Image (cartoon, helix red, strand yellow):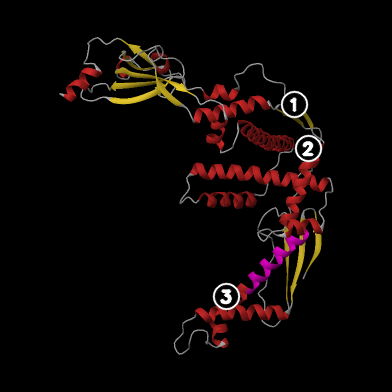
């Protein structure tokens, strides 16, 4: 049993008392473990007399009993009182227990107190509108793109075409490299798409990457020859397409499935957006440093889940930053629940409990969930106006770096063309 005998500020002094019967049981258990693993001349394993074990290992047995009692009591205390400790090392001089005697000791705990949260009402949240038809059409087009085929054409290349090329690498006239580039996807660097737009088979050109390098350090010149131009052919939007794309019987059924998927994904994204906006706003309004041991413990959990041997400094730093954010999020929502006097019934806890969670963990999880729901109920949620500029920030970021780009060059000295080189290889 335990009793809180003193409360002062964030410090709690607790008197723990274990019965003589339970102490004797722990002594017996630990002696049995030692005897089982002990090899001693003249005695079979597990048959070493108690007097010999106590003489040689008495202090170790007492220390293990004391540690077992302390850990058990501490866990039950924190579970019952729902405490968050400021540090994981409580104060207290613990005397060693005596077999067959009741055991009492005092420990003083420092509790962590999250600052009373402010700024939880009227948090502004902007959610993007759902253009359902546009999302359905884009999804359909993505299906079509995955089923695309290419046909050879007898015309200059255009945007979206697949251009097949042979390349003579600089300084190498003995062999060619074959590859293809789809115009518009910037597959091999900025500027190359422009070089192969409007070309026809057998067209030859020389090019190199151009940037800020000096004339001496400029990249070498490569020679290219167009061998074929192919245009994309998308499948027709019909029932046959629907069956090949998603295994459904009709195009209408495919559209219905896509609509259902789009709505579900949008709803999930909106929930995530709302919660992240709330957490970001509250943490910004309520800065605080959480207990170090909580961050370290969670950080170790993240690293262990990665399964890496000897994770590097960057991995450790990223895990620590993520753990810091998660601990602060947990504590601030917990503080909101306490401020709003949110309570969880035993029935709710029983319904949500699983073997991997303690009762206090379930209680905290449910309280934090209700705290989030309460904040969202009070939030100022509006719908964003559609952007006039179709180019979003994400589109801008995805554009390739243009500090280096392909340019066409005229060689001072004509070299062997790719087809001449190929002809030599065949002779």
Per the image, label 2 sits on a secondary structure element best described as: helix
Mark 2 → mark 1, Cα distance in angstroms:
15 Å
Q: Is residue 185 something that shows in the picture?
A: no
Q: Residues within 10 Å of mark 2 (few under 14, many from 20)?
A: many
- Residues at discs 2 and 1 in contact (Cβ within 8 Å): no
Where does the magenta region start and end?
A: 65-82
Residue 227 as seen in the image, left or right of residue 273: left
User: In the image, is residue 76 part of the stretch drawn in magenta?
Assistant: yes
Q: Is the residue 63 above or below the residue 327 in the image?
A: below
Q: Select label 3 or label 1 by which is in front.
A: 1
Numbered label attached to residue 383 = 1
Q: Earlier in the sequence, mark 2 or mark 3?
A: 3
Number of numbered tags placed on the structure image: 3
Q: Is residue 121 something that shows in the picture?
A: yes
Which residue does the image show at 59% across and 19% down from the upper left?
391
Our reading of the magenta stretch's main secondary structure is helix
**Residue pointed to by mark 3:** 60
Q: Residues within 10 Å of mark 3 (few under 14, many from 20)?
A: few
Residue 269 as seen in the image, left or right of residue 148: right
Q: What percent of the width, then of the height, locates residue 325? A: 65, 42
Mark 3 → mark 1, Cα distance in angstroms:
67 Å
**Residue pointed to by mark 2:** 376
Numbered label attached to residue 340 = none
Per the image, label 1 sits on a secondary structure element best described as: strand
Q: What percent of the width, then of the height, locates residue 140? A: 58, 28
Q: Select label 2 or label 1 by which is in front.
A: 1
Res. 111 image quadrant: bottom right
Image quadrant where one finds the N terminus:
bottom right
């Amino acid at each position: 049993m335990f009793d809180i005998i003193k409360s002062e500020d964030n410090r709690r002094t607790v008197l723990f008392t274990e019965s003589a019967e339970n102490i004797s049981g722990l002594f017996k258990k630990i002696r049995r473990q030692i005897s089982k693993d002990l090899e001693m001349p003249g005695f079979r394993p597990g048959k070493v007399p108690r007097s010999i074990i106590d003489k040689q290992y008495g202090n170790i047995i007492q220390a293990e009993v004391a540690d077992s009692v302390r850990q058990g009591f501490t866990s039950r205390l924190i579970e019952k009182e729902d405490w968050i400790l400021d540090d994981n090392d409580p104060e207290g001089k613990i005397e060693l227990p005596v077999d067959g005697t009741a055991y009492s000791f005092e420990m003083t705990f420092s509790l962590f107190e999250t600052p009373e949260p402010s700024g939880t009402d009227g948090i502004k949240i902007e959610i993007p509108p759902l253009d359902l038809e546009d999302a359905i059409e884009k999804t359909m087009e993505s299906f079509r793109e995955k089923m695309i085929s290419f046909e050879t054409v007898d015309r200059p290349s255009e945007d979206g075409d697949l251009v097949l090329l042979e390349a003579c690498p600089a300084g190498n006239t003995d062999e060619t490299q074959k590859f293809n580039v789809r115009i518009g996807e910037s597959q091999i660097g900025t500027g190359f798409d422009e070089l192969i737009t409007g070309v026809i088979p057998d067209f030859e050109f020389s090019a190199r990457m151009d940037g800020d390098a000096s004339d001496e350090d400029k990249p070498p010149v490569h020679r290219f020859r167009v061998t074929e131009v192919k245009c994309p052919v998308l499948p027709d939007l019909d029932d046959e397409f629907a069956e090949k794309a998603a295994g459904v019987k009709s195009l209408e059924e495919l559209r219905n499935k896509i609509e259902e998927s789009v709505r579900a994904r949008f709803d999930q994204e909106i929930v995530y957006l709302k919660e992240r906006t709330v957490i970001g706003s509250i943490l910004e309004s309520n800065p605080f440093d959480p207990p170090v041991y909580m961050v370290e413990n969670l950080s170790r959990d993240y690293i262990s889940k990665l399964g890496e041997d000897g994770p590097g400094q960057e991995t450790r730093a990223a895990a620590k930053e993520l753990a810091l954010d998660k601990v602060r999020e947990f504590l601030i929502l917990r503080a909101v629940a306490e401020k709003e006097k949110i309570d969880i019934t035993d029935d709710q806890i029983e319904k949500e409990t699983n073997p991997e969670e303690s009762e206090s963990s379930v209680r905290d999880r449910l309280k934090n969930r209700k705290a989030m729901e309460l904040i969202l109920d009070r939030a100022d949620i509006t719908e964003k106006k559609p952007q006039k500029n179709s180019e979003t920030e994400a589109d801008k970021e995805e554009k390739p770096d243009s500090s280096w780009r392909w340019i066409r060059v005229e060689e001072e000295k004509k070299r062997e063309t790719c087809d001449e080189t190929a002809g030599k290889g065949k002779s």
